[in-house]
Amino acid sequence: MPDRALFSDLSSALDRSLPVPLSVQLKGLIEYGIACGELPAGTRLPSVRELAEAGGIAPMTAASVYKELRQSGLIATRAGSGTFVADGVASASAASIARIEAHLDAALAEGEAAGLQAQEIASLLSARIGRGRARETRGVRLTMVGVFMDATRAYAAEIQRQLKPGDTIVAITIDQLKGEGGPATDIYVTLANRRAEVAALLGPDATVLSISFIPSERTRARLAGVDPLCRLGLVSVFPEFLALMKPGVLRFAPHVASVEAAVVGDPRLDDLLQRVDVVVHATGAEPALASLPPGVEDIEYRHVPDPLSVQTELLPLVDATRFRAAPAAAARRHAR
C-alpha cells in the first residue's frame, strides 16, 4: 500500500492559489520531492485513480504526469505492485555493486565451508583491504553536475568536506556538460530530477549518482526569524518548484500568514516585489530581483547536500570505486 501520509501530502499540497497549473504542481511535488529527500528511493506512490480523486484532478492529468516522470527515470511502475520512486544510481553502477556483493557472498560461503568463523573471515577481508590501500593511493575523482554554477560549487565544497584525503570533486553545470563534455572522473553526482538527463549526456559507461538535498541551516534560521506580520513573497525560476517551495518555506516560517508567489518572467513579478516586506527566492532567481525596493529583506531558499545521503549513498560508492580501481592500477603497473 502507498504511504498514507505521503498520499495525503501529495493531494493536499496542490495549491490553487499558486500561479501554476495543477498538473505542473503535481509534477513538481514529486520531482523536487525526490530531489529534496521527501520521497526516498523505493517509496510507493498512490495510484493514478487515488491521486486524481484525492487531489480533485482529472485521472488523465495524473496519468500524464506519471508518464512524464517515468520517461525521465524518476519513477518506475512494477507490474502488479504499483508505482515507486526509482533508484538514484545509474544501472551500470548498480550492476557493478551487485557483482561485488555476489563475490562477497561467495567468499563468505567458501570461508564457512572451510570452517572459518565470521570474525575470522572479517579479519581476512580487513587485512586484504588494508593491503589494497597500501598498494594504491590514487584518490577517487568526482564531478558535481548542477544547474547554477555558484550553487553547484557550494554543493561540491560541502561534499569535499566528507571525502577522504586524496579524493577530489569539481563542479560543472549541465549547460557546460552539453557544450564541453564531462571531465575525466570516476563518479558524477547530480540532483535526482536531473540524473536521467545527465546520464543520457554522458553515455552508458558513466557512473551517475543522485543524492538528496535539504534546506541549509542558514536558510532555516532566517525563515524562522521572519516577522509574523510581514508580507512574504516567493520567487522561483521553475514554476514546478513553487509547489514544493511554498510548503517548505512555511515549514520553517509557519507563523507567517501573508504569502504570495510568482515565477521569473511573469509580468506580475514586479508588482509583487513592490508589495512585500520579505522575498524568499529560489536559487538562480537572483537576476530577477534587480527591481527589489530598498529595505525589503531577501532570503535565498538555498539547499545543501543532505549529509546522511552523502554518508549512506555516495561514500559507499566512492569506496567501492576506490577498491575496483586498485586491481586495475596494479595490472597496469605489471604490464609495463
Image (cartoon, rainbow, N blue to C red):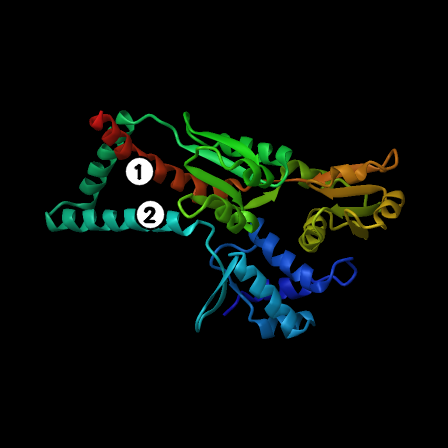
At x 51% / y 34%, what residue is drawn? Answer: 159
Q: Position of 278 compared to 114: left or right?
A: right
At x 69% / y 56%, what residue is drawn? Answer: 243
Q: Position of 50 compared to 264: left or right?
A: left
Residue type, mark 2 in image: Ser
Residue highlighted by disc 2: 96
Against 326, is 195 above or below?
below
Q: Position of residue 315 (x, y in %)?
A: 42, 39
Observer-nearest of 248 and 57:
57
Residue type, mark 1 in image: Arg
Residue highlighted by disc 1: 324
- CA gap, disc 1 and disc 2: 10 Å
Observer-nearest of 243 and 199:
199
Q: Quadrant of the C terminus?
A: top left
Q: Position of residue 102 (x, y in %)?
A: 26, 51
| Image quadrant in which you'd find residue 296 | top right
Does the residue at mark 1 contact the one at mark 2 (Cβ under 8 Å)? yes
